[in-house]
Amino acid sequence: AGPGSYTVGTMSERFDCHYCRDPLQGKKYVQKEGRHCCVKCFEKFCANTCTECKKPIGADSKELHFKNRYWHDNCFRCFKCYTSLVNEPFMLRENNKVWCSNCTAAEDAPRCKGCFKPIIAGDQNVEYKKMVWHKDCFTCSQCKQVIGSGSFFPKGDEFYCVSCHEHKFAKTCAKCKNPITSGGLTYQEQPWHSECFICSNCKKQLGGKRFTAVEDQFYCVECYKECVAKKCAGCKNPITAGFGRGTSVVNYEDESWHDYCFKCTKCARGLANKRFVCHNGKIYCAECPKRL
């Protein structure tokens, strides 16, 4: 836009400057609001001040105006990239700074949390809890590899790919020493994969089932009876302490009995925790040997 509010010309008549009273005939003058003045007085008393450089916009300068603000034409440049905005689209922003449309779009665009540069329309991005990254800037905090749109695990302000999260945070199986990523079980405060917590004999999984531990080995009920448990010298069945009825065991020399099977051969009196006599490999109460 031009000045609009004043005219500039060369005086042909006899007029004096409204301010300094110097004659204007034959000289360049400015007429504003019905008053005639020399160029020098115009700049001193009447000229608009450039919004950018804060200097007067003289009669010989090209002036641009917008919303009661004025600029020299060479001051009307994008605040960010310094491109001239004469005859170009622009935006008037804070502090009376003018911006070109490209810089305005970049400034208003969300900022990548990785590189802090704007994410403009068309850029592939990743969003999480009101934060945004360029797709290639969303990387694992541990290995620094690009996660992009893949699976990840947040930990505070850090993000981990599946592999790094497993090795850094997942529990480690007490048997195979590999991470437990899901499921699993706990025995004696140690984590196990379900597929690692198995019967040492038949290899069936023991999670949720009855089992017994012998040193570092685990056995289901059937395999414990078959392979590990001692056989009762009385009934010849396995002595499975903890599995049902036979909770107490009587040991004598190299043989063992269920407590309810340890009884007198003659009178069948129960002898667990009582005095007994061994005669010809058989067990008797204290009275029956006298009757033999």
Image (cartoon, helix red, strand yellow):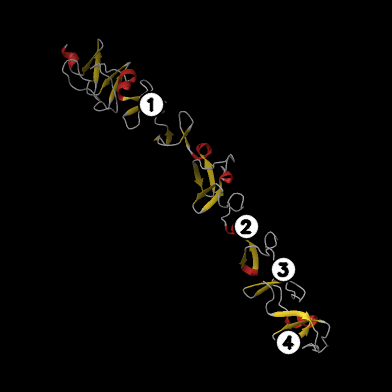
Q: Which residue is mark 3?
A: 73
- Check the picture and name the quadrant holding the N terminus: bottom right
Q: Say what secondary structure mark 2 lies in.
A: helix
> Which one is in front, 139 or 157?
139
Where does residue 14 sit, x and y in percent of width and height? 81, 89
Give the answer, above or below, for where 272 lies relative to 122: above
Where does residue 15 sit, x and y in percent of width and height? 79, 89
How many angstroms separate mark 2 from mark 4 (CA)? Answer: 43 Å
Q: Say what secondary structure mark 1 lies in.
A: loop
Q: Residues within 10 Å of mark 4 (few under 14, many from 20)?
A: few
Q: Residues within 10 Å of mark 2 (few under 14, many from 20)?
A: few
How many angstroms separate mark 2 from mark 1 (CA)? Answer: 65 Å
Give the answer, above or below, for where 6 lies relative to 192: below
Q: Earlier in the sequence, mark 4 or mark 1?
A: 4
Q: Verify CB contact (< 8 Å) between mark 3 and mark 2.
A: no
Q: Which residue is mark 4?
A: 35
Q: Earlier in the sequence, mark 2 or mark 4?
A: 4
Q: Verify CB contact (< 8 Å) between mark 3 and mark 1.
A: no
Would residue 43 be seen by someone viewing this image from the given angle? Answer: no
Q: Which residue is mark 2?
A: 102
How many angstroms separate mark 4 from mark 1 (CA)? Answer: 106 Å
Q: Which residue is mark 1?
A: 198
Q: Nearer the viewer, mark 2 or mark 1?
A: 2
Badge 4 amino acid: Arg
Determine the residue located farthest toward the front in the rendered image: 12
Badge 3 amino acid: Asp
Q: Residues within 10 Å of mark 1 (few under 14, many from 20)?
A: some
Q: Nearer the viewer, mark 4 or mark 3?
A: 4
Q: Nearer the viewer, mark 2 or mark 4?
A: 4
Q: Earlier in the sequence, mark 3 or mark 2?
A: 3
> Which one is in front, 199 or 126?
126
Q: Residues within 10 Å of mark 3 (few under 14, many from 20)?
A: some
